[in-house]
Amino acid sequence: MIPLPEQWQIFMALGGGGLLLAFLFDCYRVGRYFWRPRGMTSHLGDAVFWLILTVFTFALLMFINWGEMRAYVFLGLGMGVTSYSLFLSGSVRPWLYRSGRLLGKVMAGGRRLITGVFFIVIIPGRIVYRLTSLFHRHRPPHPLE
């Protein structure tokens, strides 16, 4: 039998875990808004997301109470998710959308940087390589050939 103060600690930790699960769900919602997966990609992304959340929840339960399933475990996770959805989601999600837009701009800048490096370094390098390889084609044959 687990003492009541320890059950209360477990309940509070599971409430925090529920908050984190709901936050991860909001992150996934924002990610889907920006990437807009279609068809099978959408189904595969959903399956992978829920698999990751399932593994996270399992690890959380194993870490907090050795995987014991009691009514207060479901209640704690549910109260954490509900608390986040009611009180935090409305103010956190706009921040996530702004962060997503900023991340998109950073990724576009990185893509432009990589493309610029490609055109400045790689293409002239290929031209120089081809020009220098013209001079090395007429080598004398190897003595053992």
Image: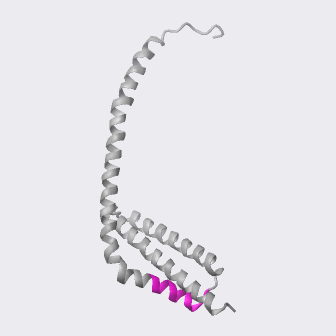
Residue 7 falls in image quadrant = bottom right
Asked if residue 74 is among those painted magenta in the image, a careful observer would answer yes
Residue situated in front as seen by the camera: 91 or 126: 91
Q: Residue at x 36, y 70 (%)?
A: 29
**Quadrant housing residue 81:** bottom left
Q: Position of residue 65 (x, y in %)?
A: 63, 81
Question: Residue 31 colored magenta?
Answer: no
Which residue is the extreme one toward the front? 5
Which of the 4 image quadrants contains residue 83? bottom left
Between 93 and 55, the residue placed more toward the observer is 93
Rendering coords of residue 12 (x, y %): 53, 84
| Span shown in magenta | 69-80
Exactly how many numbered labels are in the figure?
A: 0
Q: Position of residue 13 (x, y in %)?
A: 54, 80
Above or below for 93 versus 3 = above
| Side of 16 where 62 appears, left or right | right
Q: Is residue 98 above or below residue 109?
A: below
Residue that appears at 66% across and 80% down: 66
View extreme (right): residue: 1
Residue 127 placement (x, y as % from top left)? 37, 22
Q: Between 42 and 83, which is closer to the camera in this rendering?
A: 83
In the picture, measured across the screen, residue 104 lies left or right of residue 56, that is: left
The type of colouring in the image is: one colour
At 55% across and 76% down in the image, what residue appears? 57
Give the prevailing secondary structure in the magenta stretch: helix
State which quarter of the image contains the N terminus.
bottom right
Quadrant of the rendering where the C terminus is positioned: top right
